[in-house]
Amino acid sequence: MPAELICFEAACRARFPIHQILYNCPHCGGLLEVAYPDGTGDPEGWKRLWRERRMSNAPLDQSGVWRYRELIPFLEDFSPVVTLREGNTPLLESPQAARYGGLDRIQFKHQGFNPTGSFKDNGMTCGAAQARRLGMRRVACVSTGNTSASMAAYASAGGLQPIIFIPHGNISYGKLAQAIEYGARTLQIEANFDEILALVRVLAERIGIYLLNSINPFRIEGQKSIVIEMLDQRDWEAPDWIVLPGGNLGNTSAFGKALRELLALGLIRKTPRLAVIQAAGAAPFYDFIRTRGEFRAVENPETLATAIRIGDPVSWPKALREVECSVGVVEKVTEQEIADGKAQIGKAGIGCEPASAATLAGIRKLTAAGVIRPDADVVAVLTGNVLKDPDYVYKYHTGTLTAPDGSAICPTFGNQPQRLPNDPDVIEKALTRD
Ligand code: F0G
């Protein structure tokens, strides 16, 4: 039996052919996911095969997503695949960052090493493949920046026309620059992310463009490979915790799905707990988990971590299931905590964009609260590259960064460039004094 689309809602579970163009269940409006026939695999054989593929020069094998194609088997043939050799991102240790986070040790799975500098590439290679398989010509997304950069690259590389919708004035220049350079038709709309998503969904139907937001279940399939590759790099030893930032909550959904499938196939023996960290000014999922009332969107989400400036995350029902299944937690962190966490990751020689740093800030909070033990085995997922938002970096280190509410961010770990005259004596004095 081939792969299918299945409604996520427990009361519905309607099934649809894999090549039907759907973003939500036509019966109940629920989210869709890709389902595979109850598979039996050969875990040990696969593990060996995936290692062998690292020595191959075949494009599919070189991709850190398609290398694991046995776990994302939604294509019958691989001709629609567009790969820029996504994935293949390192697991980095940092004793300094671990100390800051209150841990004995920490590993960062750095998705910023991807071709367009964020984890979106892992999912986009799958979304673009599905678009091509369906014979679509135009693809679109609304984005806080990284999805658009990634979609622009994969669409253009695959001969599709990318159209991106972004909130006017609220994405970093690094990301906007990428989308333009990769040839996307770029529309800056005077509305926030959530409003534009609603708009784009109407337009997608009207003018027949294929939506590549994380509501697209094929992107979620690709993002599973972040966890799969991480476990491969750890010789299939699951950590105690996987910590990640939460915005639209696609990654949380993808990680949880990957872990459940890996456990069912016998590739891992235990499930790590997920810790999802939101920015305090855009934390609807945190509020929901704390109160367990109705899910309430945050109307005017605000954070300098613009990648996660999302008030109405579409994937929250899936993310809820994954947090529950993994006995996970959701935490929120302030602008100051994100900024300082980011500077620590930078000082460790690793670097990341602001949203990614919510992880270390969240870990520091969770270890202080006794939720994560100091000796826990923790992997934090850094979602984007430090160069995505250089403006933020410069402002933090020079003490000119202000939070959305107008308060100043303290450059706790600031590293201000010094301006000196062209005079060896003065320079010598300056350097010997420090
Ligand atoms: N980190 C970065 C760097 C991101 O770009 C995003 C999302 C997230 C974290 C949150 O991930 O949505 O799966 O919970 N960026 C999207 C975009 C929304 O449009 O680029 P999530």
Image (cartoon, helix red, strand yellow):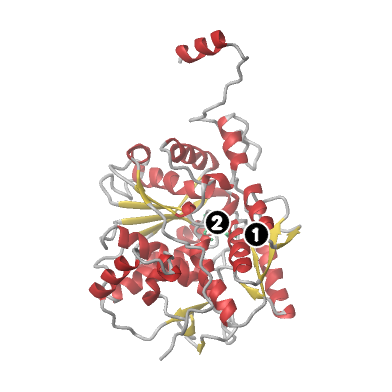
Query: Is residue 189 something that shows in the picture?
Result: yes
| Residue sitting nearer the eye, 406 or 394 | 394
First in sequence: mark 2 vs mark 1: 2
Q: Secondary structure at mark 1?
A: loop
Q: Disc 1, ligand 1: is the CB inside 8 Å?
A: no
When the figure is inspected, residue 232 is found, relative to residue 79, above or below; the finding is above
Query: Residue 116 bears which disc, if any?
Result: 2
Query: Quarter holding the C terminus?
Result: top left
- Res. 255 visible in picture: no
| Closest to the observer, 6 or 109 | 109
Residue 5 image position (x, y, % from top left): 49, 83
Q: The residue under label 2 is which amino acid type?
A: Thr
Name the quarter where the N terminus is drawn: bottom left
Q: Nearer the viewer, residue 83 or 219?
A: 83
Picture quarter containing residue 133? bottom right
Do callouts 2 and 1 mark residues in contact (Cβ within 8 Å)?
Answer: yes
From the viewer's perspective, is 256 left or right of 248? left
Q: Secondary structure at mark 2?
A: loop
Picture quadrant of residue 20:
bottom right
C-alpha span from label 2 to label 1: 10 Å
Q: Where's residue 182, x and y in %? A: 65, 59
Which residue sits at x=36%, y=62%? 229
Q: What residue does disc 1 label?
A: 182
